[in-house]
Image (spheres, rainbow, N blue to C red):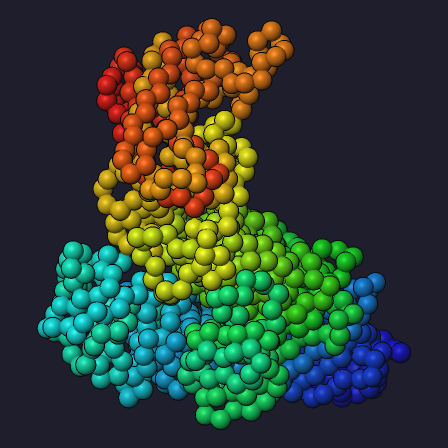
Amino acid sequence: MAQLTSTQSGNWTASTTWGGSTPADGDTFIISQGHKVTVDSDTRTTNGYGDISVRGCLHYATNGQMKINGRITVQGNGSTDYSKTNGVSAQDFTEGGSSSGALLSATGNSINLEFVGSNSDQHGIWIENISYSSWKFVGDSYLTETTLSSDTGVADSYLPVASTTGFAAGDWVAVYNGANQDYRVKGDEGFWVHDVDSSNNRIYIKKFVGPKAIVSSTPTARTIVVDYSTIFRVNYKIIFGTGSNRNVKTITAIDTSTNTITVDSDITGTIGSGVEIYETGADKLHLSGHIVRRNATKITAAAAAGTNTITIPDATGFNVGDKINIDADNDVDTNWDYNTEYEIQSKSGNTLTLTTNLENDRKEGALVINIERHIKIQTLDDNQRCFCYVEYDTDSNRAGTREIHLKDIQFRKMGGNSNNNFYRGQVFVAGYNSDYDEVNAASNSRVDFQSRIENCVAIDSNAKSNYTGLNTRHTQGLIVRNNASINTGERGYWQWSSHYNTQFVNNYGTRNSYANFANDGMYDLSEWAYLYMTRSDDYGMMFHHNRDSNPIHNIFSINQENRPFYGYYQSPHSVFRRWHFDGFRYMPYNGVGSGSMTFQDSYIGNKWYKQVPGVYTGYTNTFGVVNSGDYFAENSGPDSRVKYDRLSGVVMETAYPCWNFESDVLMEHSGAGIRWKRGNTKNWYHFALGDEYYSMGTEVITVPANVTVTIKGRFRGQSSSGWSYPYIYARAVRDSYANGRYLTGYSGQTTNLTSNNSNVVDSSTTGFHDTVRFDDAVGTWQEKTLTVSPQSHGYQLVCGYSLDGDNEEEIGEHTNLDISFDTPAVFKSKHDTITPKLVGASKKRISGRI
């Protein structure tokens, strides 16, 4: 084994590149500054080459293959010159340049890097945190792509493209700028293909997450009768029918009493009952030349376990020998650790025959993703512990010169090295890297390139753990788009620590043992959108520290073993828009340390459990396939700090205005369970979710000293037995959940003190707990009144309804609480709630949702 140092640019295998020596098995290498060494053939040796230090450029071209038993380390020049002359930086790698930086690069196809190394090694790719150390692996696109042939605007119903070849109805397509894009522009968008017009090169689209209605009878002129009309709005643009029957219309009126929709022009073609109607229209502007990429397609007919064929709408781009991922979306399989990777043995038309039988049923519409890529970075067995690491750096001057572009790469069986958390990822991009500022790009090399990870696949990590997925840490200005993370460990994607100006869009994740996606912090001009996450063990999606109310929208989280969503430390009143939840055991979780959250205009049904009666079901008419006895979910699983005897305010509450897209339905989830109402009414339906003594309809009131508070509530049950009546409760937020217990004589006091207790009234620290229970309210409304005695000191009052655990499968009704003071308040109450409050004076309702 020898160490070879480049003496000039040239081919890897040429002895002239290395001063007369020819690379041999086990040799180590230094690529000198300004030299470009190119690998364009199969150079794999028996044991692999040793360490490669890149101070110039190591470039892999088409057909370049290499086996490496060592580490590729990219070490730049450390320059502090960030200026540019005539738009070019002398510090970026330039062949022959005596001061140029370092670059690991690849372009083309059939490029394969095989790494070997044990857990004691540090083998793989390492990009140093030194100025002008860059990594650009840009493979040719393996999946079907085209470009926009002209600009498109907001609300446009189709994409004008150069070619529609390979696109079909049901495809998931991403539209984006494949070149540098200013980090402040969030231009990516995702759609489902509704129909393809090949004669005019148009791809008709429907919203990534949006409503669907069914035509009930043949339309007449400009009116359509549908099964549910409240899921649409006036001015929505809708699409229905295909080919010569395709209609794109704008809604001008909706009669919800007859479910009749009126549109802006006459309906053409043959549209009969059963035709599906969707919302269409882009939400963003897209420019001519932007890429339209086919991220996934769908199977057109159910495929049973034990069979080995599937049919897709267009098999263009799917080749014999390709590995594909077939999403395990089959309604009844609730676990997460299912094999989804299969190989194509043959294809006939649009039917793919697999080399092995399906291990689980697949239903019509299951996603199919081709996971082949033109660049492969992999280890050869489960025992190798090699990794790809962009070293952590938050110096914006230095890090801004590090340009990262990973495109169309398959990372397989990488990661798992336990010597450091950073060495465990299939790929781990840490710290700041370059972003693109269109105003200053011409003069400043720190902002002249947009770093991005796009169109990559991370699959089947070794020694799966927290860190073995497609991970980033504390990045700034990074785009992560059109990727798939499959069976990569505990977290498919982990955005570790804070992330700034991030765009995370059109990504897919499945079969991860803790969360398909986990984010630790979201700041500045960021966006998370057009995501499809399925089949995780614990949590589908995890969001933390949404400090700038970033747009988080158009996301599928389905068939998650436990919870589809976990949020913590969100800014109060964070809004998540257009989500689709389905298939889960436990409700989406809003942590006790968060403010209230809102899922606006979103679908949350659950085919695994009994559906809530009287609420639009949508998308499927099959419910209760796992448990037909429990409503909506197995449990709510709230924190014990939101029990009614411990609660300090409105916490762990989530609102779903326009529940399941319906314009007049509001649903709220709290510790106690779910409540919902239709229209502008004070009356709510409710049921518990298996947890006892949690609060529902919580109110927080500032009560002045020496004021009597009167609280009135109404309840009625729908069945006569098998459950316990709820309470109205009121308590002072003073001594946590002790509520005056353990006070009298320092012994023997183990029950709550009430507001009229002498030890409570004159104390500014001792709390109280008053309750009244309903006792005769089946089929008719019963009203109960709870009177809270005046206290010598002002305090915060928390009150609400408390449901018993055996209300789980019993639907009841309650009204908003009516709360009044016996003397006028001299100031308004201050609330932190998820819906508006009314504030008044004596004998008037001063609080409560409307």
421 or 569: which is nearer to us?
569
Residue sitting at x 51%, y 13%: 765
- Residue 829 place in picture, x, y as percent: 33, 24
On screen, residue 268 above or below 85: below
Q: Residue furthest front?
A: 721
Q: Is residue 296 visible?
A: no
Q: Residue furthest bottom?
A: 348
- Residue 236 place in picture, x, y as percent: 23, 62
Q: Residue furthest left?
A: 221
On screen, residue 752 above or below 616: above
Q: Quadrant of residue 159?
A: bottom left
Residue sitting at x 35%, y 17%: 787
258 or 64: which is nearer to us?
258
- Residue 661 place in picture, x, y as percent: 31, 56
On screen, residue 771 above or below 609: above
> Would you say 212 lies left or right of 561 here?
left
208 or 417: which is nearer to us?
208
Residue sitting at x 16%, y 63%: 260
Question: What quarter of the picture does the N terminus occupy?
Answer: bottom right
Residue sitting at x 75%, y 86%: 43
Question: What quarter of the picture does the C terminus occupy?
Answer: top left
- Residue 329 place in picture, x, y as percent: 49, 69
